[in-house]
Amino acid sequence: MLTQTRSRPGRASQIALMLLLCGAVSGCGVAYMTQAAKGQWSLMRARRPIPAVLADPGTSPELKTRLQLVQDARAFASSALLLPDNRSYRSYSDLRRPYAVWNVVAAPEFSIEPLHWCFPFTGCIAYRGYFHERSARRYARTLALRGNDVLVYGVAAYSTLGHFADPVLNTMMEYGDLELVSTIFHELAHQLIYVSGDSEFNESFAVTVEQEGLRRWLAARDRSVELAKYLERRHEFEQIDAAFTAGRSQLGSLYSQSLPPARMRERKQARLEAIGQNVLALEQQYGLHTIYDNWIAQGLNNAHLASIATYAGCVPGFQRLLAAQGGALPAFYRAVRRLAHDAQARRALCREDALTGEAAGAATEASRP
């Protein structure tokens, strides 16, 4: 049945898709399951092979240029980065909206840990996606009324983990060239290795692959000036991520204290404002304007910090692991697969002493022939 959905989903395939995305009705809720199935069905139905879009005289020159870039990145992903060589990102869908989905992230008022929602295949994840912004914001309001900090943000791309032939989306065309290329690498990395129920590990692995992939893609094309600028900018964002990580750790220490709620809220607000000021100072130092500006202006909360940690928390550990393999991707992937089966080693990887103890043992074993 999944093979059928890869071609042209029919009615039976819609049912299969519902089961894939949500599983039992009792686990997702009828409304959520229905919107997820309809949204994915609409996305898949809109697919057109990229060669057909390029040959279409009605396709704009700008879109043709971007899709040719996608084809280049897609070929490089499989040949040089050893990412899955399948039908994903070889078709194009115009959704006629600015984002593919809108994610809802939530965390309790006095906790740095996000809420999780559990589904088949993906396991428990730290966000819940909606194909309509209004539905996402409605659900976020429900969570806020229960006392949670919430965040709603648009997502331009996502992966079905290889279960379907994911298309390139019009929402991705707003990216700059480097971000578009790195997104292809990121989403294919999810199809290569995915640990059910560990969002931070999965996203940090995909970020590491996209960063290393983009570095190699630029180097292979002798774009040394762009490469130097990219590496400099990446270092700057790493400093910003570190500021968020330090602040989140301080909040975690605060929340572990036994304080009256009013006093806890006062200290929480002061700490969040300090985090925002530290990030803004770094942005000013580097001459950056980021999405964080709006978040800080509106007031940071636990959900913002949880969202950032999901994508950045384990990246330094993965970078060290890649370096320990001498930059060899096959050995790196073997090491990551070994970690995927050991929750304790995965957590060790994300600590400052990564590649010692459990993580080092797993990496050594995984890299052996």
Image (cartoon, helix red, strand yellow):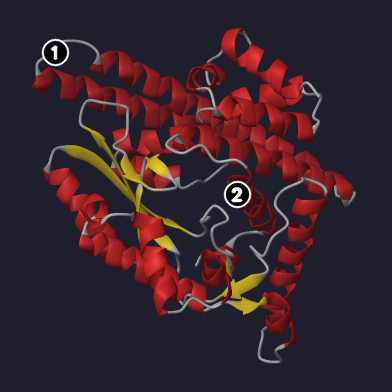
Looking at the rendered structure, the kind of residue marked 1 is Leu
Please state which of residues 287 and 357 is positioned toward the viewer in this rendering. Answer: 357
Q: Quadrant of residue 97?
A: bottom left
Q: Earlier in the sequence, mark 1 or mark 2?
A: 2
- Determine which quarter of the picture holds residue 272: top left
Q: Is residue 107 above or below residue 6?
A: above
- Which residue matches tag 1? 259
Q: Which mark is residue 27?
A: none
Residue at point 25%, 50% (across, down): 27
Residue 337: image location, x then y, percent: 63, 31
Image quadrant occupied by the C terminus: top right
Q: CA distance from mark 1 to mark 2?
A: 44 Å
Q: Residue furthest top?
A: 357
Tell me residue 306's x, y (percent): 37, 34
Is residue 274 or residue 194 the one in the foreground? Answer: 194
Question: Mark 2 falls on what kind of element?
Answer: helix
Looking at the image, the residue that sits furthest to the bottom is 57
Question: How many residues crowd mark 1 within 10 Å: few (<14), some (14–19), many (20+)?
Answer: few
Q: Residues within 10 Å of mark 2 (few under 14, many from 20)?
A: some
Place of residue 109 in the rendered image (x, y in percent of width and height, measured from the top left)? 20, 31
Residue at 41% x, 58% y: name it: 20
Vertical comparison of 120 with 256: above or below: below
The three-letter amino acid code for the residue at tag 2 is Gln
Q: Which dot marks residue 191?
A: 2
